[in-house]
Image: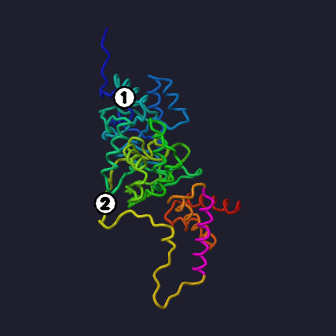
Amino acid sequence: MPRKRQPILPIPPNTELIALTLTLQPQSEFQAPTHYTIELHSWFLNQVRLIDPDLSAYLHDGQSEKAFSLSSLTGNLQPKNRSLTFTPTELYQWSIAALSNEVCKWLQEWLRTPPKEIQLRSGTFTIQTWEVSLPATTYETIWNEAETTSSSNKDQQLSLTFTTATSFRKRGNHMPLPIPENIFHSYLRRWNNFAHLEFEQNEFLEWVNEFVVILRHDIRSQKTQAGKQGSVTGFIGAVQFGLTPKAQTEPEYVQLVHALIACAPYFSTGHKVTFGLGQTIAGWSVDRPLEKLPQATQPVVKKVAELDAPKPLSNQEKPSKHEAKRKQRQAELKQFFLSKKKRQGGERAEKAAEVWAAIVVRQESGEAIADIAAELDLPYDTVKQYAKRARKVMEEG
């Protein structure tokens, strides 16, 4: 009996995450539509179908998070008349990331007799080389490594670079901003689908809103074609996140943040990651280097009371009656909201009551939600949701 062929890139049987990069060369010059990634997507699922039809159907029609991500092509893409020209004198790279043990097992089988070319509707590429671009690992390994990283990384600074347009779906619209809640929500959805350790989504995202901050960024918007339906506006560039000192009160969430950051290059970020959007790499990788933050600069989230506190007055200045009434109103509302909390003790309940009171007082003063969000350094949707809840509590008395 002939021996079974060994894969060209052996993958350990317990692997749950891995990424491969293929180097491609056009067999002849051809033009492809700007949404050519749907052709790559279709070709990939057909390759899965040839070996495992059930897995292909699940990856195509399953309602859960997709267990793979696909990059767009990198290289010298030449735009021409709303299309892209590929020439045989150029080489292009294409990456495939597997996010579950089932897809990794399929990859292992696929690589026993790998295809020599990629035939798309627009043209054909010869596959020149295969390489592992992100190492084979497991979610348990990433989780255990994150425990060490989170305890040793005292300044808690975390950087990611987004190399293709990255965007999120927010109430039917595109949100092309690296808001921490959106970033970590996209990773947590995939983690909860494929890892063996699941976390409650709302509690974690509330913690992210409170303790994860953007230390700096170097981003710009980019419009790209992500399907036949139309273009998507996203952002590209680098972002450095940080954790406030009080984040350490929830060490498991700190560990989870580090684990999700480690998964980001495999997962990609945001939506349409199987069509080339949201490609992500670890670290700060833009033209402008990431200078070290001054020692005195630490991520700080001010208390709402501090944000609303009056500035030091000179001997000639006196607080206005309006400001005094506003402070009194906010203090009364804080006590009211605190009395309505089921769990009244603890810093979190008091913090929530402060935030609700500040939002209501500012709304009563005629401030818009967007201005309140900017002043309190909170996401727009979070402030809007808090305002709605606060009003409901006040109506119920």
Identify the mark at residue 288; answer none if there is no mark. 2
Task: Bin the neighbour count of mark 1 within 10 Å (Cα to Cα): few under 14, some 14-19, many 20 and up.
Answer: some
Q: Is residue 334 magenta?
A: yes
Return the residue found at the far bottom: 316
Residue 280 placement (x, y as % from top left): 39, 47
Q: Is residue 236 magenta?
A: no
Marked residue nearer the N-terminal end (1 or 2): 1
Residue 278 placement (x, y as % from top left): 43, 47
Q: Are marks 1 and 2 in contact (CB under 8 Å)?
A: no
Judge whether 63 appears above or below 179 on screen.
Answer: above
Return the residue found at the far right: 396
Task: Bin the neighbour count of mark 2 within 10 Å (Cα to Cα): few under 14, some 14-19, many 20 and up.
Answer: few
Q: From where the camera sits, is residue 24 visible?
A: no
In front: label 1 or label 2: 1
Quadrant of res 284: bottom left
Query: Which residues, given as a range, are shown in magenta?
Result: 322-341
Query: 207 or 74, which lies in front?
Result: 207
Hey, what amino acid is under mark 1? Asn
Quadrant of res 220: bottom left
**Residue at position x 31%, y 57% in the image:** 287
